[in-house]
Image (tube, rainbow, N blue to C red):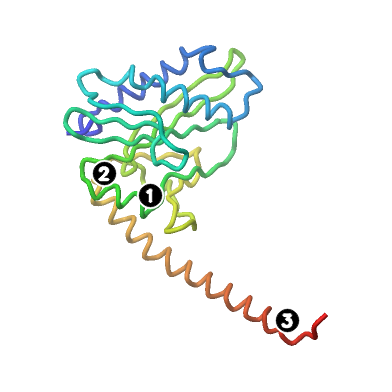
Amino acid sequence: MSLFKNDLHLDIQLNVLKLLNDGGTALGLTPRSSPRSVGDSIQDYLSQNLQCILPKDLLDEYASEFSRRAMADVAFKDRGGNYYVVDIKTHCLSTKFNMPNLVSVERLTRFYDERTNYFSIMYVAYELTDTGWFFSECKFVPIEYLDWSCLTIGALGWGQIQIANANIINIIPQSRKKWILNLCDILMDFYPREIGKIENRLTHFQAIREKWVALPDD
């Protein structure tokens, strides 16, 4: 049984907030730190310290060194053989809107060919207060717990799953099968629309080419 099925992830969420709010100077943040630098600091700090707050009787293997193109910021395996890839996402509550990328639809579905693999999102919301940086919310869930009402598909490669608005995260625990079937239905609508856009672009540049062919050489 995965840690999401027995609600251990709820304890991890609380422990992540405590870890970050107790981090102090170790996080390396100042009042002038930009959202990007705060996000990088949170990611680095959690990568180095998350292992310490995972249940000791759960953890089997842990890794925190990955290339920038990897799916994971952190990955670990539990003693039941479940493998968790964790993508750490941060959100500054004072920003009105952003659309963080999560994962390629092709890469995710290939990863999910193995039923014991979990692509997980660790979302951390924070703000700057009079007393310093305050970490107010953590959500740690497999991607299939993110309802499609808060997700969208971006036109990159096969399609990139994105959070539509980082201010709105709708979590509805559901089966992986139901979520993947919804993904496939969404893609069956998404791809024809992308084909239509490409056909319009082809027509546009065919007309431009014909125009330039008719002009005299310089």
Q: Nearer the viewer, mark 1 or mark 3?
A: 3
Q: Residue at horizontal 31%, vertical 52%?
A: 109
- Mark 1 is surrounded, within 10 Å at the Cα level, by few (under 14), some (14 to 19) or many (20 or more) other residues, namely many
Labelled disc at residue 148:
1
Q: Position of residue 106 (x, y in %)?
A: 36, 55
| Secondary structure under the numbered disc 1 in the rendered image | helix
Residue 55, placed above or below residue 177 = above
Residue extending farthest front: 218
Q: Position of residue 21 (x, y in %)?
A: 47, 15
Cα distance in 3D space between marks 1 and 2: 11 Å
The residue identified by callout 3 is 212
The residue identified by callout 2 is 174
Going from N to C along the chain, the mark reached first, 1 or 2, is 1
Q: Is residue 190 left or right of residue 175?
A: right
Quadrant the C terminus occupies? bottom right
Q: Position of residue 153 (x, y in %)?
A: 45, 54
